[in-house]
Image (tube, rainbow, N blue to C red):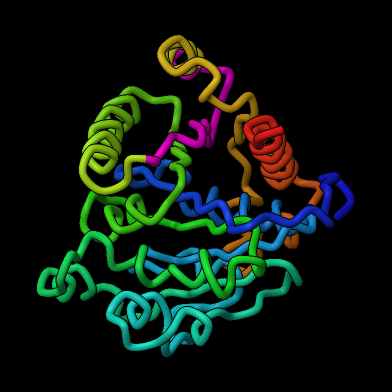
Amino acid sequence: MAAVPSPASQSVASPRIVAVSNQKGGEGKTTTAVNLAASLAAAEHRVLLVDMDPQANASSSVGFGRGSVDRGTYELLLGDAALSDLIRRTELPTLDVVPASADLAGAEVELVGVDEPQTVLRRALAPLRGALADRYEFVVLDCPPSLGLLTVNALVAADSVLIPMQAKYFSLEGLGALQGTIASVKAALNAALAIEGILFCMYDARTNLAQQVVREVRSHFGPLVYETMIPVNVRLSESPSHGKPALLYDIESRGAQAYLELAREVLARVAEARPG
């Protein structure tokens, strides 16, 4: 685990909340949320992973398989349980998770009847800015592959958005749609929301299209695009079926090493942005 050097003793007043979001499916969103959270935890940073996706793939990827969770983000959003009662430990000592229960699939319908339904998650995570402020350094929100109420809640609660995408034409269209949603959330509900970064996943440098898409996105977004790119890697696909992040399944794999490198890059950016 020493592969990601980190100032583990450094503490922060409250955690950095990062929503991992892309409304287009198959872009590497959950893989990124799980493996970035695990890689930051391997660097001895205290991390909380919150599964906002009714598919619950992030939960199963850290050991909480479908049907094994009786309470989770649904109960958090509906006010049926406090955040501290829903946090579960994972195999990594510094990584905790709020898993998704089966009931989360109905949350968007039920939230419509709640006062200020777009801010429910922000209110539910309030202890992270108060009583639990020193417990975590990062909170990673795995969003659904849609721009519905669950994703909007995550964007309202987050400090920043990390956008995974493939180097494909239709992924460019999805990036444009997400940009519009982020702008709307900033204007109405979360003025401080920023783009944490754009990450290319399942990248195959052998194709001209992939190289062209990367050039286009870099020309438009500049330094917001991570230098790290996640390659196509079978170990990343296999590890969720074992209930493990890639670094616990095969730390020597290209996929695990790429996410460890991404963690280094994320930490370096956070350090650069920190006052002083």
Assign the C terminus to one quadrant of the image: top right
At a point 12% along the width and 69% down the height, the residue shown is 112
| Horizontal relation, residue 163 to residue 263: left or right | left
Q: Is residue 250 visible?
A: no
- Answer whether residue 231 is visible to the viewer in this image: yes
Residue 22: quarter of image: top left
Determine the image quadrant of residue 73.
bottom left
Residue 100: where, in percent of width, then height? 41, 74
Q: What's the residue at 48%, 66% (across, down)?
A: 50
Which residue of the protein is positioned furthest toward the left in this rendering?
113
Residue 262 rendering spot, x and y as whole percentages? 66, 38
170 above or below 7? above
Residue at screen point 19% across, 65% down: 117
Q: Is residue 208 magenta?
A: yes
Q: Answer with left or right where residue 73 lies relative to residue 88.
A: left
> Residue at the front extreme?
276
Q: Is residue 94 above or below residue 13?
A: below
- Where in the figure is residue 194, as x and y percent of width and height? 42, 36
Which residue occupies the foreground of this view, 13 or 218?
A: 13
Depth order, front residue of 249/227:
227
First to last magenta residue range: 192-210
Q: Locate residue 272: give its quadrant.
A: top right
Q: Residue at x 66, y 51 (%)?
A: 235
In x, y percent, where is residue 19? 44, 50
| Nearer to me, 224 or 272 | 272
Q: Is residue 220 above or below residue 43?
A: above
